[in-house]
Amino acid sequence: MAQASDQVRDDPGRSFIGVLQKIDDAAGADGLTVSEIVDQLDERAFGLLILLFALPCLVPGLPGAQIIAIPIFLLALQVVINRSEPWLPGWFMRARVKKSWISSIARFADKRLRWTETFARPRWRWLATGIGERLVGLIMALAAVTVMLPITNTIPSVALTLASIGLIQRDGLLTLLGSLIALGWLTALGVLITGLVMGAGFAVDLLSEHAPWLLNLFQG
């Protein structure tokens, strides 16, 4: 898989939305196991799997987002160490995904992400291959950790979605955009944690001055 991956990933004619629709078509009434989904993926499996798990986490307050974040974290770490094929725990590979969930993801991608296949293309490859890819994987792993926290999963999932599409299409611009969103979110959480240590007033004052939109998000 590793030897042919760069050539396949860099082919803009290969539609990741088409892959998701293929998975939907393959799912019977009982859905598919995660292992069966992995078998449907091509050489872009890491990016496609992270995308597949990140999309449902875009829903604010999604029940179970903390569990879904676990495979995202594990897959991102495997990008960091440059593993050739994805690995997930056996219990997770045997878990069955409902047909309705798979269909919802395929429809969402077709409706909301179709623009990315026109916009995304191989560029700034140093941010989507080699050391750049590993660095993006590390940032994605950190973003996945924040999805596990009982705060909100939407913002880091936006970052994960953009970065994973960037890896799939070898588009360094999208990996950069996703990474910047993730780093901004990590910084904001760092401020909040610092505020818990130094006093809540410190965090509130800092956010009010530099990121009032984020303060409003937590208050809402």
Image (cartoon, rainbow, N blue to C red):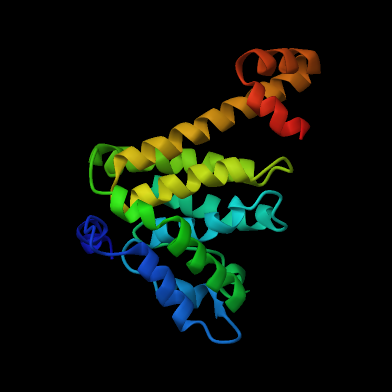
Please give left or right for residue 161 compared with residue 9 in the image: right
Whole-percent x, y for residue 12 in the image:
24, 57
Identity of the residue drawn at 58% across and 31% down: 186
For the N terminus, the quadrant is bottom left
Identity of the residue drawn at 24% across and 38% down: 124
Q: Quadrant of residue 55?
A: bottom right
Whole-percent x, y for residue 93 in the image:
55, 71
Residue 115 visible (yes or no): yes
For the C terminus, the quadrant is top right
Viewer-nearest residue: 9 or 104 = 104
Please give left or right for residue 32 compared with residue 150 in the image: left
Please give left or right for residue 186 compared with residue 13 in the image: right
Q: Is residue 51 above or below residue 174?
A: below
Viewer-nearest residue: 109 or 95 = 109
Whole-percent x, y for residue 63 in the image:
72, 57
Residue 97 visible (yes or no): no
Identity of the residue drawn at 45% across and 32% down: 180
Whole-percent x, y for residue 40 in the image:
40, 75
Number of dots carrying numbers: 0
Viewer-nearest residue: 186 or 20 = 20
Q: Is residue 156 above or below residue 99?
A: above
Q: Quadrant of residue 176?
A: top left
